[in-house]
Amino acid sequence: MTLLELVLLIPAAGFLVALLLPKGNPKLVRNFALAVSLVVFLLSLGLIGAVTADPQHMQFERSIQWMQSPAIRYHIGVDGLSLWLVILSTLLTPICILVSWNSIQKNVSLFYAFMLLLLAGVVGVFVSLDLFLFYVFWEISLVPMYFLIGIWGHDKRIYAAVKFFLYTMAGSVLMLGAIIWLYVKSGSFDIPFILDSLGKGRLTLGASEGLWLFLAFFLAFAIKVPLFPLHTWLPDAHGEAPTAGSVMLASVMLKLGTYGIVRICLPLFPDAAKASANWIVVLALIGIVYGALVAMVQPNMKRLVAYSSVSHLGFVVLGIFSFNHFGMDGAVYQMLNHGVSTGALFILVGFLYERRHSLEIVDYGGVATVAPWLTILFVITSLASIGLPLLNNFVGEFLVLQGAAVANFPWAIVAALGVILSAVYMLWLVQRTFYGATPAAVKSHFTDLSPREWAIIVPLVALMLWMGVGSGSFLPAVRSSNDQTLNLVLKSTYARQSSPPAELVGRVTRPDLKESADAR
Amino acid sequence: MPGNYMPSAAELFRFSPELLLTAAGTLLMIFEAITSPKQKRSLPVFAFLSLLAALALAVAASSDPGPAFNRMLQVDGFATFFRVLVMAIGAVTILISTNYLKQAEHEGGEFYSLVLFSVVGQCLMATANELIMIFIGIEVSSIATYVLAGYLRDDKRNNEAALKYFLLGSFATAFLLYGVAWIYGTTGTTNLSGVRGVLLDPQNAPNAILISVALGLVLVGLLFKVSAVPFQSWAPDVYQGAPAPVTAFMATGPKAAAFAAFLRITMWAFEPVKNHWIPVLWFTAIATMIVGNFAALRQSNVKRLLAYSSIAHAGYVLVALTAASKTGTEAAMFYMVSYAAMNLGAFAVIAHVARKGERRVEIDDFAGLGNRQPLTAAIFTVFLLSLIGVPLTGGFFAKFYVFKAALDSQLIALTIVGLLNSAVAAFYYLRLIVIMYMQPAPEGVDTLPEPSLGIRTALVACSLATVVLGVFPSLVLDIAGRGASFIR
């Protein structure tokens, strides 16, 4: 059993065990879930060495036949693209379990069991190299999140949970259709095998066929991302989910969509991806500006952060469809950044909620005077989210903007608008919540951070700083696996009108990012 | 057939499961008359064991496949597949029924003997290689089921269900019989292989219009039995009115057998003229999926909801039939197995929650089940997820194989409609999960007793089957593949 399999299977086993643990003892289940998730996190750190040494090839690969007909393989592996996403998932799970420590009081064992199942599901999506397996994990991750929102959420939780499930389901059934179609054509679900067949010409997809398949996959991913105008499930799901649910949803589950685009849509259907790039970029740009504008006027903190996610994820999609190294690297880095900083924002909002029992901004004010540490951490996280230099989002957003500028300069102008607007809504939120007069209700409710809360938030804030100043620890692995994807996309015959200069396209190995970061 | 025909020992062996069940059913009626009320407790055990014995015989008989009774029956892998399935369905039905009948104060041996007779009819439908045998099988199965639907004779809803089922069912079988007569008139035979031979023979090919009319009439009867649009309107009323265990049986056993006959007729006898029936099934499949799913969205009664859901599922199976291929046949066979497992399980839960007089069959009656009986709710959730088609359940692979078969045959539009339908369907199954887990039980709700031993056994068996089918589907698919080998 490889290390990667342990990371995948321990949470799944933990799910079953957590269900069987005695119901009357919430403490036992909490400790068990925390222990399992910490072990999985530590194990996942063991993946780093081998993958960063050779990020272009799948590491810890394992391929066994699951069934003969249809030929479904249990084929997993991790490369530079999936590595950090796997670690992000394993890191956030123990954090989310700690976040829920006191706030989850009903059906405790079921809650932690679902957290572990969710971890198994999302890691499964990130490491699957078989389309069928990918789909299985994709759907499995949906089930625990549905219950997390529906059972432990806020007032309108049922509406939000059902909406979330149906949106995702509607997208994924079409993806299933496309997967079966590919199987009928190629006789395999195995992604590397299909890529090989496409490369060697054993499998050819007609232009319109490729486009329809691309769209079927892309729709499923775009709903998950979510790309404007498919985003309407997101504010409801985020707004109504418990804190842990919001964090996992924003930090990990949205990335399933962007990951799917990079892992499946681009390599399998490069021509279709390029043919539709302009349309997709327009939607991404609308999402960036629209998400930011709507975030600005939200009276509810969670919904504000949710809309900011629409805006941030628009950057990711923009970066991907710029089809150059800057954009792609920035997009993948931005997936991680968004996971860390938006996850932290949801957690901090959760802290506020636990004290004041309200998510409405008007119920707050002057928190800085009663909880200075909480305020400082919130401000740092907000600044990270805005994209302040030295903090993580800056690196990602800069690269995406650079990539967009190279591809088509007006795109970068519109996207930069999103950066400015993000400062408006975040700083305004900070001002209304933490400064100004302190209402009596806030004064009487507030205490500063408890040790548990410190333990939750410090790793994330430290990571924001590290990812902001030390992007060299993370980016090289991402970059070399992006090289492969980009090569596949760019070498195919269809040429886009505003293609980037040849010297940028052809450069497979580039100087270390530090140089380009210094150069700017 | 010669007048002095004597079946050989091998033929009798091939027919032995039906013989055994008929004998057991008759014995049950006699026992019912001569045993004391206390001894009657053992009657369901006897019925259950005889079903298991017949099942073992059916498996044994498959080691010596071949025709029986002058090629009226064909005992092959296909027949064995469906025989075993309908007998297993009968056995689970008995498990669900015992406690239900006790609560209703209507315990009696005739219930079980009717179940056995109905199973005999369904076995005949699965084994028949002859239109007249299919007709007899349908009649044997249906007449027993008509009585079962109205088994609680003091209950108004039972009576309504039985009468409706009887009237509409007789009408449909009349169509079928009329179609058989037409087929005899045009081809000169009612033997399925004979019909195939005539249709394949270019020299004396029958008139295309006549054969289409004949086939159309037969299809009316079959589509009625599988509750496909536009012959579905009986199903919701009958499923809602009949006792819950009988509904479980009706929704699975007769349907599986009807699809067995359907497959033999379309994929074997009338395979040479498949261009005539593929368009018909194409439209029927789409209409059945859409009507079933969209009508189910608006139901508040759980039995009625599952009735519409079973209409929708018939639509998915029809998609597999429309594919008109070996993979399509395998997919349909696999579908019936996983459909039977999840539906029997779901109805078992309903029978358990409904209790005496079936006063608790509204969706709201399931509120808070996740807290009141976590295990029952969890198992019900497995069935519902399987009905939605979530991976790692049998329902997922069932749909997967169906749509794969459809895409193999280039039925793209049909596949897309089917896939979108399964997203719509998620909504009404989720409503049940929502109610069980996300809404508290109303104040002052009476306590739900623990499920009886029979129900518990049925739930464990069905949920295990659902999960195993979802993880190792090839166990059943390979058998289905061998069964479907009569298709080229």
Image: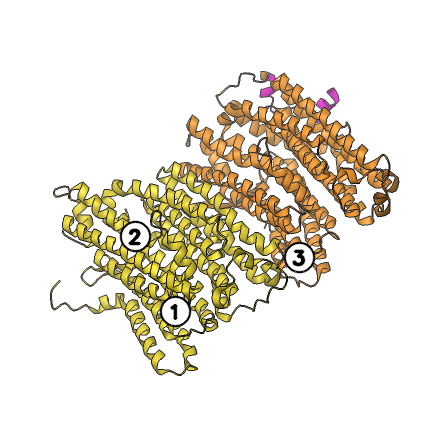
**Chain identity of mark 3:** A
Mark 3 or 1: the one toward you? 1
What stretch of residues is rendered in magenta? A503-520
Q: Which chain is yellow?
A: B
- Callout in the foreground (2, 1): 1
Q: Which chain is orange?
A: A
The C terminus of chain A: image quadrant: top right
Q: Which numbered circle lies on residue B222?
A: 2
Percent from the top left, x then y, of residue A166?
Answer: 54, 43
Query: Is B254 inside the magenta-drawn segment?
Result: no
Closest to the observer: A287 or B409? A287
Q: Amino acid at mark 3?
A: Asn
Disc 3 target residue: A107
SS category of the residue bearing label 3: loop
Secondary structure mainly formed by the magenta segment: helix
Disc marking residue B170:
none
Give a yes or no on whether discs 3 and 1 share a subunit. no
Q: Which residue is mark 1?
A: B153
Q: Which SS class for mark 1?
A: loop
Image side of residue A501 versus residue A450, left or right: left
Q: Chain of mark 2?
A: B
Residue shown at 66%/23% (left/top)? A415
